[in-house]
Image (cartoon, coloured by chain):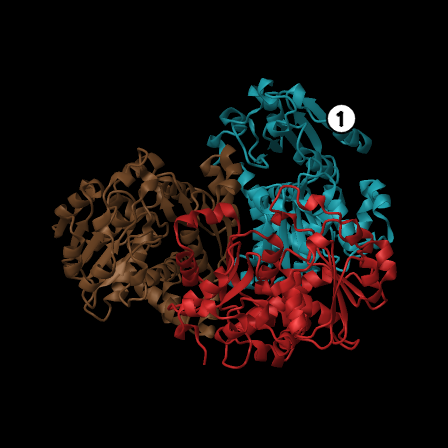
Chain colours: A red, B cyan, C brown
Amino acid sequence: MAKLTDITWEDFSRLDLEAKKPYLERTEGDGMPYHTLFAQQFDRGILERLCTLANRIRFINKSKEGALYLKNVLAHKRAMLYFSQPSSRTFLSHLAACQILGLTTGSVRDAATSSEFKGESHEDSIRTFSSYFDMIIMRSPEQGLAEKMAWELSNSERPIPILNAGSGKDQHPTQALLDIYTLIRSFENKGGIDGRTVVFCGDLKRGRTVRSLSYLLTNFSDVKQVFVAPPELQVPDDVTAVLKAKGVRYEISNDLRAGVRIADAVYMTRIQDEWDTAKGESAKIDTTGFKFGAEELALLGKDGIIMHPLPRRDEIATCCDHDPRAMYWRQMRNGMWIRAALIASVFGFEQPIMNCGY
Amino acid sequence: MAKLTDITWEDFSRLDLEAKKPYLERTEGDGMPYHTLFAQQFDRGILERLCTLANRIRFINKSKEGALYLKNVLAHKRAMLYFSQPSSRTFLSHLAACQILGLTTGSVRDAATSSEFKGESHEDSIRTFSSYFDMIIMRSPEQGLAEKMAWELSNSERPIPILNAGSGKDQHPTQALLDIYTLIRSFENKGGIDGRTVVFCGDLKRGRTVRSLSYLLTNFSDVKQVFVAPPELQVPDDVTAVLKAKGVRYEISNDLRAGVRIADAVYMTRIQDEWDTAKGESAKIDTTGFKFGAEELALLGKDGIIMHPLPRRDEIATCCDHDPRAMYWRQMRNGMWIRAALIASVFGFEQPIMNCGY
Amino acid sequence: MAKLTDITWEDFSRLDLEAKKPYLERTEGDGMPYHTLFAQQFDRGILERLCTLANRIRFINKSKEGALYLKNVLAHKRAMLYFSQPSSRTFLSHLAACQILGLTTGSVRDAATSSEFKGESHEDSIRTFSSYFDMIIMRSPEQGLAEKMAWELSNSERPIPILNAGSGKDQHPTQALLDIYTLIRSFENKGGIDGRTVVFCGDLKRGRTVRSLSYLLTNFSDVKQVFVAPPELQVPDDVTAVLKAKGVRYEISNDLRAGVRIADAVYMTRIQDEWDTAKGESAKIDTTGFKFGAEELALLGKDGIIMHPLPRRDEIATCCDHDPRAMYWRQMRNGMWIRAALIASVFGFEQPIMNCGY
């Protein structure tokens, strides 16, 4: 079995993602992650197991008895939320997921509190947290840090799991999970994801969401991907290269309305001007044609859905909010359920929950 | 039945408080609030029910078994404490109230953490919280925001309750609740609140406390209100206009000692110089005669009580702290109990708690 | 019996530590603290009882059933963590200790949140917390504040216990506890602490750790203490004066390797330049000979241990981290267990836990 204790960090870090995957499993060959570091750990089987578990947890939680059962599942565990890059939305979603399962939590969630760790190496900080907690949910501006910490802990006396809640620009695996979960739920009794057309619109160049979701969709059959963006913000070549290599149908476009007409799902994104390298870079781009409003809503099929990772600015007009096809609020709540499913599974409680009497 | 789903925000916002009240009830005609937004929601019957429930919770909590029973009451619920205007005292009191009932909590409690929401509309932030939590306890510098959010949520797929923990200068309904609860408890076996004389002293012009308590006291029979303040800080005309309209006896005064001699309760307040519109405005006012010390204590009747919403500066000398008539510490603790009562009632647990075997 | 209600603050504050001790006991003559304020409260009997209780809690917590038993022990209590001097490590360790025992917690943990209390006296802030919580765990830059607050609360209507998690430069009693606990565990089946040689190295002049541990070691028989430091950072005279008075063997040295050769435990410390009174004061000191690396490791006996209160900079080379004699990570985790033991004992649950069926 591939174990992180059998490989040096240098050797591990040089592997490609596919080769890293078995090192991160909870049980050999099972696929379910112990450390959750990147979206590529989820193949179709894993995605479906996690979505099934999330549905189960959501159902059990409807009754008070069920909710109290769930609160007992991980009541003997404690999770550390280490957010050196603040994000209240992602923080609260993971917090709620922990609370559903009964985990108590500690946190460092802003620069002010975490600054005191600056004199200390990341490795020492993480080992500190591992002394007091049973899982570390971490968000960091530093690319690759979650991977390094997973390796470090696995080679320590407290080999507790790491859940990557966003590391730099590269990975945010549970965001990808909740997007897939939302698609699966939306098309649950309508034939599933296979054969669907997903239209991405907005800033497709920067940020992790589109990149990860585009990849995960290749796990399904015959999903067509359409990328609608101003030329300056189009999807990067390495994303389309993966699609080409896998024989996935895709289209590059700058016509949102044409996209909406053929879309099963429209995935809107915000212009991520926080990544501007020159002052006002984003402001110079004409984004007028890349917003979803009443007219686009009128073009969307009756089973079509609108998604957004939130927060939004003006990419989606608020007049769409009460339309039953607006899925972005439910998408956010889905994030809580799928994270609860993931955490339960990391600690080996997939089967007990699936089989419990609630 | 009056429902927030049956009225537009524009129409609702134009109603006066009495007319708004039925839209905020948990059950038609019952009076108990679902959304708790302003002190005028509490009539005498509601106040007495909440105080009775608070007494019951306080009693049950005395034994470990009782405390564990209470911790199970809302163990299946999660509350979000959204304090965009920081206040550790009010925050901790609501937090403790949640913990007594077993609610787990998430929070945003300072500018640093909440600043990231700035790019997002209030409506979107609140809907985010409503995705993860079952109740929102909010404090905001913005007048009327809690009302708007209550309307928004009631018209969403997650119509969870809002508890206003202070919005701008206008309302802080649970502060008024705890003041009434303190009066009710203090005169419990001494004939009750009816017929009492309550003396307000200090800065009666600014801040929400005096305004709300003065109003709630009109629910009781024949309570005389005396307002003792320097002329610059006297109680505003709209407050006395309500008293006049309701035929309530009141007096405007600048003689604290005369007030103390006839008082059943002396309600001291801090000079709220944070609302100064000109630099040093408050400092120019002569407040020497509006402080409660050893001499005032000597004038107070043996069943009289001293109240203060805290924090204090020098309005009450510390030499009064150990006098049995100093009620301000107990008043603070009363806040925790009455908030627990309110939260339990919002979720429909008034009767189960009243009737439980503890 | 010595009670804090029978003595004025002025009289109490003038007593020496030995004379203060009985005023802080939970039960007359028993020795176990109610308020935990300084390391000198722990004599050998108390230390051994707390370490035995910590071992018991650690053992019970290994099974899920045991962990759930522990989470019920103080589930009816709430603790306030009041950290006006931030320290995430100490904060998280106390938080985890509370969570193990089922206490729910509130916190003020940084300057931003606590600044609003500035207009209020410490006494009023602490009384506020005592209204909502059943224990206050406090860390403050102000020397002696925890003592004052313990006296204040004991003389109030809510005489809840204070746990000092660090006050100014003088006391940090639970750090001393965890150091002793680490020594006791390390030599548990190897003849105990009596007769051992403990080598302190680094900045022995500033900071509370060395001072407290040196004192507590005098509770054991024939422990030799060696102080290895550059002359500018040597152990203060008042520490060696205590050793002289008690007839304890000690040595002043500047030769770490000579110390390591004879050491049963090497206690490394960080240069505490945050206490520099002149700019660059610490940087001018030659500390090259006071670091523990591969060569020192080679000199350490096979049963010897390496300790460090953490965080570290470069006093211990990371190449030592995986050596079985490197005890500093376990030392940190020991802190959580011994704090849980202390808190359980403060609330009178030493015997129930010792005698429970797990």
Indicate the chain on which mark 1 is placed. B
For disc 1, the neighbor class at 10 Å (few under 14, some 14 to 19, many from 20) is few
What residue sits 67% from the left and 38% below the top?
Answer: B141
In the image, taking residue C205 as reference, residue A336 lies left or right, namely right
- Residue B335 rendering spot, x and y as whole percentages: 60, 46
Query: How many numbered tags mark residues here?
Result: 1
Q: Please state, as top left, top right, bottom left or bottom right, where the C terminus of chain B lies in the image.
A: bottom right
* Residue B67 appearing in the image: yes
In the displayed structure, B93 sits above or below A211; it is: above
Q: Nearer the viewer, residue C182 or B253?
A: C182
Secondary element at tag 1? helix
In the image, taking residue A304 as reference, residue C328 lies left or right, namely left
- Residue B259 rendering spot, x and y as whole percentages: 62, 25
In the displayed structure, C97 sits above or below C108; it is: below
In the displayed structure, B11 sits above or below C297; it is: above
In the image, taking residue C76 as reference, residue A55 lies left or right, namely right
Residue, disc 1? B237
Q: Nearer the viewer, residue C160 or B17?
A: B17
Q: Nearer the viewer, residue A278 or A290?
A: A278
Q: Please state, as top left, top right, bottom left or bottom right, where the N terminus of chain B lies in the image.
A: bottom right
- Residue A121 rendering spot, x and y as whole percentages: 40, 54
Residue A296 position by quadrant: bottom right
In the image, taking residue C17 as reference, residue A190 lies left or right, namely right
* Residue B37 appearing in the image: no
- Residue B236 rendering spot, x and y as whole percentages: 73, 26
Q: Nearer the viewer, residue A255 or C79?
A: A255
Circle 1: residue type: Asp
